[in-house]
Image (cartoon, rainbow, N blue to C red):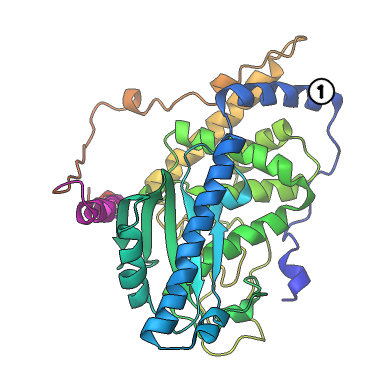
Amino acid sequence: MSIQSRYQPLYNPILTNPPTQIDLKIDTTLKTYMDVEMKLETDEEMERRKLVLKQVEHIFLQFVRTVAVEVLHLPEDEALAAGGKFYISGSHKLGVREPKADIDTVCVAPNFCTREHFFTILKEEFMGHASVTEFNAVETALVPLMSFDFDGVSIDLLFARLADNVVPENLDILDDSILTGLDDATEKSLNGPRVTMMIGELVGANFQTFLIVLRCVRRWAKRKGLYGNKLGYLGGVNCNILVAFVCQLYPAASPSTLLTRFFQVYSSWQWPKPVMLNKIQQNPPNMVGKDRIVWSAEIYPHHLMPILTPAYPSMNSTEKVTRHTLAIMQQEFAQSHAVIKSIISERGKDFRIDWDRLFEPSDFFLRYTHYLGCHIIGAGPDAESRSWIGFAESRVSFTIYIL
């Protein structure tokens, strides 16, 4: 696949008509509702977050130099030249600006910095830092990470170790050859920023509309109890891809129209047909070493709701979806499609649209008469207890196969 084709949507647009005057008036009502009910993080707080990220990046780069000088005994000039990169992914990188949201980050280090160094030298640095609280290290996960609050800003810090002993200043993280010679954990860590950047490219010129609709979909999913990838529902990357896909199908649509189309498309989507932003790329010709497993229905026939990541190697971002959680999401998509059509058609001449109806909380606790409660308790407010609680939460979804 050529570099150009990676950024070309797989499907042709369904409709490219520009918004009508009525569409724009409906957009105004949605914007008014969002200004009141979906407030953005303030400019001051965004600036503070930027400063926090700069401090975390500085600590990481100092860690690379520490390993180079104190462990490998490299000269200072060589240690400085080894470099290092700090990437942001997920909703913060896209500009969702959700108040108090976690920030996903990835440290890209030269090869001489090992994961053992990351979970000893850098871990001790953060644990002892005066600005760090709620520290937790998850070393045995598929994607090992450290999570902590830095001056009240929640950070998830992943580690990527390149094959070379120098991280070039002009490193292109979207160049697939960067994956050559990497271990699986590093590859998965790099997947976050690679996918985030490619989603931005594949949305195209309608990016601001994408952000508006994404904020609405995230709020909708949380209000309906559908936000939680660990439990077999939608996570951040799933929402990003689903909204980006609808943007591709209706590239000129206004926010309110695109939100309506979102529920229309997914209320009738024929799962397990995969949602794909671009053509799945098999092993690129410039790759050296092992062939990677790229998602296909033949390899993963048990995947019920495949939402595929656009960066190589493409993978399903919804592996934990079960028949039960899929049925619930399908029901909510259909109900919300009916609701949004209803509230727009009932707008009247004064364009009063009851957007609250679309975001009404789930009636889960009214729908059933019996529930199973699960209390996860740690020994105390320490890192080991937080790690145990996180591990237990990640295993809750497996109970559906037992009950």
Highlighted magenta segment, given as a residue range = 380-398
Q: Where is residue 99 in the image (x, y as percent from the top left)?
A: 51, 36
Q: Residue at x 40, y 88 (%)?
A: 72
Q: Quadrant of residue 375?
A: top left
Q: Is residue 396 magenta?
A: yes
**The N terminus lies in quadrant:** bottom right
Answer yes or no: is residue 82 visible: yes
Q: Position of residue 110 (x, y in %)?
A: 50, 80
Q: Does the magenta stretch include residue 165?
A: no
Name the kind of residue labelled 1 in the image: Ile
Compared with 332, 305 (above or below) is below
Residue at 47% in and 39% down: 100
Q: Where is residue 152 in the image (x, y as percent from the top left)?
A: 41, 43
Please identify the dominant SS of the magenta region: helix
Q: Name the residue under label 1.
A: 22
Position of 387 with respect to 244 (left or right) is: left
